[in-house]
């Protein structure tokens, strides 16, 4: 491994860190803790694919939130490309929220 190469696990951690800076405008919790991120894939070419959902199919940020996620992930120095795929299978429920998010929203 050269000094130019980056560990995909380390890159995954950087991606999660960036995802935690993106908030659903209606809920004061980041999209990662909210459980909207289902999976993050990083291949050996440092191309990222993010499988995510929205709180509802009619979410007011359905057009802008995936673009914000793509843009912020692409801004990570070693990421060559990023793509967001939206899915509603399985549908989002409050059970997907982290304990931290539930605590923040007074659900615990």
Image: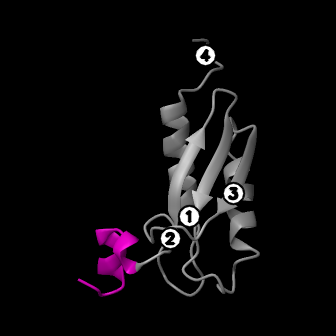
Sequence-wise, the earlier of marks 2 and 4 is 4
Which comes sooner in the sequence, label 2 or label 3? 2
Question: Callout 2: few (<14), some (14-19), or many (20+) C-alpha neighbours within 10 Å?
Answer: some
Q: Decide: few, some or many residues near mark 4? Use Cα within 10 Å; few <14, some 14-19, many ≥20.
A: few
User: Residue at coordinates 60% horizontally, 83% vertically from top-left?
Assistant: 25
Distance CA(mark 3)–CA(mark 4):
29 Å
Q: Are marks 2 and 1 in contact (CB under 8 Å)?
A: yes
Residue at (52%, 41%) from the top-left corner? 12
Range of residues picked out in magenta: 94-108
Pointer 3: residues within 10 angstroms few (<14), some, or many (20+)? many
Q: Earlier in the sequence, mark 1 or mark 3?
A: 1
Q: Which residue is mark 1?
A: 21
Tell me how far mark 1 sits from mark 4, CA to CA: 28 Å
C-alpha distance separating marks 2 and 4:
32 Å
The C terminus - image quarter = bottom left
Q: Which mark is residue 3?
A: 4
Q: Percent position (x, y) of residue 20?
A: 51, 62
Q: Secondary structure at mark 3?
A: strand
The N terminus: image quadrant: top right
Question: Is residue 97 visible from the viewing direction of this image?
Answer: no
State the image coordinates of residue 58 (x, y, percent, origin top left).
66, 87
Numbered label attached to residue 30: 2
When the figure is inspected, residue 9 is found, relative to residue 30, above or below; the finding is above
**Residue 16 higher or lower than 28, as above or below:** above
- Image side of residue 28 versus residue 52, left or right: left
Residue 17: in magenta span: no
Residue that numbered label 3 is attached to: 84
């Amino acid at each position: 491994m050269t000094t130019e190469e980056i560990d995909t696990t380390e890159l995954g951690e950087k991606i999660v860190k960036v995802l935690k800076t993106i908030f659903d405008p209606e809920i004061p919790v980041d999209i990662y803790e909210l459980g909207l991120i289902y999976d993050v894939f990083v291949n050996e070419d440092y191309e990222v694919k993010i499988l995510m959902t929205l709180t509802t199919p009619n979410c007011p940020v359905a057009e802008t939130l995936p673009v914000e996620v793509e843009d912020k992930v692409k801004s990570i120095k070693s990421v060559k490309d990023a793509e967001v795929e939206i899915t509603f299978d399985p549908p989002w429920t409050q059970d997907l929220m982290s304990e931290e998010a539930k605590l923040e929203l007074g659900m615990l």
